[in-house]
Amino acid sequence: MRQRHIFQSLLGTMAWVSLLFSCSSEEMGKNEDEGQYPSAIVLSQENEQTVTFNVGYDVVNGYKVIFDVYAENPYTLTPEGLFKKEGIKPIVSAMTDENGRYDITRILPGGVKEVYVTSDCVGVPALLHGIIAAGTVTPTEVDLTTLINQKENAETRAVDFPILYLGDWNYWGRPNYVDKNKSCNISKEELKSITSALPEWRSVNKDYCTAQGIHVEKEAEVWISLLNAKSLFNNALGYYCYKDGMSKDEITEVIALPRTDMSSLLNTGLKSGEYVKLKYYNSETKKLEDKFPAGTNIGWVLHRSGYHALTSTVGKGTYQFYSNSAWNPEKTKNNHTAIFSTKEGNLIVGFEDVPNESILGSDNDCNDVIFHVSAEPADAISTTVEIPSDETKEQVEEEVDVVQPLSCIIDVPALPFWLDLQVASKSRMTVVDEIVTGIEDVFYIANSSAMADMVTRTFETSGFTRKVVVRTTVKLSRAEKEKGRTVVRTTVKDTSWEVEAQQDSRAIVVLGDYDSVQELILAAVRDHADELRAGKYIKVVVTMDFEEGVPYEQFVNSINLPPYSPFIENTSK
């Protein structure tokens, strides 16, 4: 077995283990991953690499960002927008520290040359990209609008509708009228609550979609600040003042943001915490004024693809979505806006920029563009809808699949039968507030010939017969196990084992008292040695929940490659 650095932790866990014995590699039980993985070819490499991540997000102090790392671009483009590819899985899932930093060294497949980093958290870029060089990767922000060739025509460039501007902007659509005297007062707790209220790929809570705009209760100055801009399109954001009963043709629109883009890249977009001051259009004087009178209603309109980079102009765009839902293009499902306040009283507006009745449909999550509306005095604007505070702790789960000789994870007899055994493991780690709180390992053990068949077959159904698919994230040879990678051993308390063996469609439950997962696996292999020689496989599932937890960085620096459970030992006995 590889040399391992030992980590001791006074950690209590409960462990549940099941073992499944298969009749043959051609007659498998239900496959847990019914589908193909687009990244299988990229990830099926015969080596591994150690990569140091330098991930950094510009966030308010204390805001932890949950993100996923992929070996290929996880997004696919359709005529209706940007969508996550079906079946794709991240190779790393993690969380930054309170400063938005993740500077950790991880084991990756040797075939991975570049990484794509995504995050659903409000206030950070949707996509980062980095090239691995000299064992290090520093992902940088990607402008999503560069991923699509946005069409411009006479209709989308048209500016013959009533429209006013707050000022001019640069080539990239960044306003030259950012108010440098206004600063952001959105806390990390509020950002977390907004992320929970407007999650990615999930339809928004209808309770957040009842308001058609914002009512100004007393004379006030009004500002907006982008919190989230993860749309594929070069959208433009406008606003208008209206009275009940007004039609769309009666309003006068003012463009607040020619391009709803957030970026830390030079001056290409707005930065987090930057505000733009809105102005009231006086329909009698035909002028823009600094203050909105009491009784004013402010509505919002999003012009999808309304900004045109070739000409640096604003047009109608391909669609116009209004906070007054009756003015939207759909016949029934016509809401595109969520308007609510946080517990702290900050007013938030979120927009969906995909038609709800399109052929491909919309996720209607209303988080493609999210902005904060503030006023002076602060109590001049309000809404009746308030989102709850998110009191849950930040949690992330990471899955890693590995194929390696069984001798890499346990000490085995130096005999041909044992040295030929391979183990494919699917491991999940749960991290809460930078503490590892539990793990799950799923093992498939078979001889090298049977394992080769398991890792190369795609999923297929033939009658009632299904084949197990093992996605190879990291594939190790026996020579590579001698590298002496660091692993962990920690204490286990109140451990009980449940072993289930299935043969000829009959289930037999066997209970045993094992001091470690290594003992369990050795016993399982010995009990089914003849079947393994015949090309069958055994399956072991181990789940552990830790009572105290292990610091994340300490855990991954110790167990830098799964499976985890063979190296968690009960030292309290």
Image (cartoon, rainbow, N blue to C red):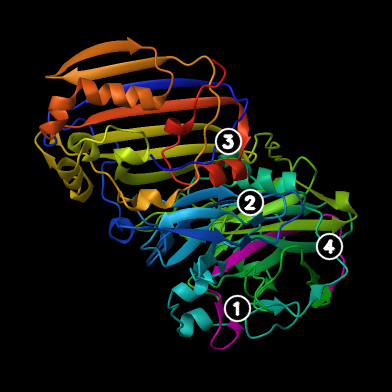
Residue visible at 42% across and 20% down in the picture: 16
- Kind of residue at badge 4: Ser
In the displayed structure image, the side of residue 233 where residue 78 appears, left or right: left
- Residue 12, how many percent across, how many down? 58, 21
Q: Is residue 308 magenta?
A: yes
What segment is highlighted magenta in the picture? 289-315
Q: Is residue 396 left or right of residue 339?
A: left
Q: Secondary structure at mark 4?
A: loop
Check contact, mark 4 vs mark 3: CB within 8 A: no
Q: Which mark is residue 24?
A: none
Q: Quadrant of residue 222?
A: bottom right
Count of marks placed on residues: 4
Q: CA distance from mark 1 to mark 3?
A: 68 Å
First-in-chain label (4 vs 2): 2
Other residues around mark 4 within 10 Å, as few (<14) / some (14–19) / many (≥20): few
Q: CA distance from mark 4 to mark 3?
A: 46 Å
What mark, if any, has residue 183 been given in the picture? Answer: 4
Circle 3 is placed at which residue position? 7
Task: Provide residue 551's location: percent of width, then percent of height.
Answer: 63, 38
Circle number at residue 96: 2
Amino acid on which disc 3 is placed: Phe
Residue 235, compared with residue 456, is above or below; it is: below
**In 3D space, how far apart are the residues under numbered discs 1 and 2 (Cα atoms)?**
46 Å
Q: Nearer the viewer, residue 63 or 54?
A: 54
CA distance separating discs 1 and 4: 33 Å
Q: At numbered mark 1, what does the secondary structure look like: helix, strand or loop?
A: loop
In the image, what residue type sits under mark 1? Phe
Quote the CA–CA distance across marks 4 and 2: 24 Å
Q: From the image, tell me which residue sits under label 1.
A: 161
Q: Three-letter amino acid code at disc 2? A: Thr
